[in-house]
Amino acid sequence: TAFFNNFLWVIFVPATATFLGLLVAQLTDRLSWGNIAKSLIFMPMAISFVGASLIWKFVYANNADIGLINALRQFFGAAEPLDVLQVHFWNNFFLMVILIWIQTGFAMVILSAALRGIPEETVEAAIIDGANPFQLFFKIKVPQIMPTIVVVWTTITILVLKVFDIVYTMTGGNFGTEILPSYMMSYMFRDDGRATAVAFVIMIVVLPVMIWNIRQARAEMR
């Protein structure tokens, strides 16, 4: 269960955070108040994972007077409150939202710098050739910053493979939300051998991603 949940985190969180960061970086560069928007989106990076988890614990609270989700459900006529953290399988995605909320700002800052580094000549040439905004973005800009996108994606992937604070704070690994780091911590003080074995598995899983990240970073610097 822990390994499968970790697989879901690795697939969903880096891809979503990188995509949203790229989208926000592109959109905010076109706004006069884009720097303010970037500051607000980057702000969650300053919050610890435990602090962010406590904030979202209120959002997910099954009390409609506190929890945003249950307040919306009550507004649309739902009679019974719903504890989303106890809904098996889907509760993992509700936990992932917290990390995406934090990491989107990181992806946005890096990718915004990469977008601004694109030579204006290529953009102007594409516009003269009749490229529409979507073609300009996906066929001209994205291919030129693809190495940066890959570095951001792999960096977030490494973070995902090490995170346990969110799961530990929100559910303690209960209700089918266990991941490898939280599983390791649950045995840390009562079975050193099992905890060490899980830590070794995490290291093996992280190592290829780290090697790939280093290679991409070196290739980008050349």
Image (spheres, rainbow, N blue to C red):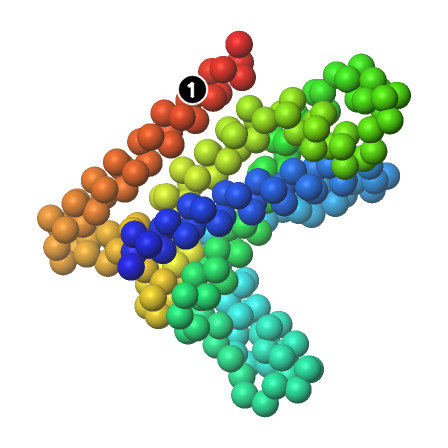
As drawn, is 185 to the left or to the right of 137? Answer: left
Which kind of residue does numbered mark 1 sit on?
A: Arg
- Judged from this view, the residue extending furthest toward the top is 222
Vertical arrangement, residue 144 with respect to residue 202, above or below? above
Where's residue 192, x and y in %?
13, 50
Please tell me which residue is depicted at 70% across the width and 42% down the height of the picture: 24
What residue do we see at 87% from left, 26% from top? 130
Image coordinates for residue 83, horizontal then vertical, percent: 48, 76
Work out which quarter of the rendered image holds the N terminus and state it.
bottom left
Residue 205 horizontal/vertical position (percent): 30, 38
Q: Secondary structure at mark 1?
A: helix
Q: Circle 1 is placed at which residue position?
A: 215
Q: Is residue 205 above or below residue 211?
A: below
Circle 1: is it few (<14), some (14-19), or many (20+) Cα within 10 Å?
A: few
Q: Is residue 167 left or right of residue 67?
A: left
Residue at left offset 45%, top offset 66%: 91
Total marks placed: 1
Residue 92 in the image, given as x and y percentages of width and height: 43, 61
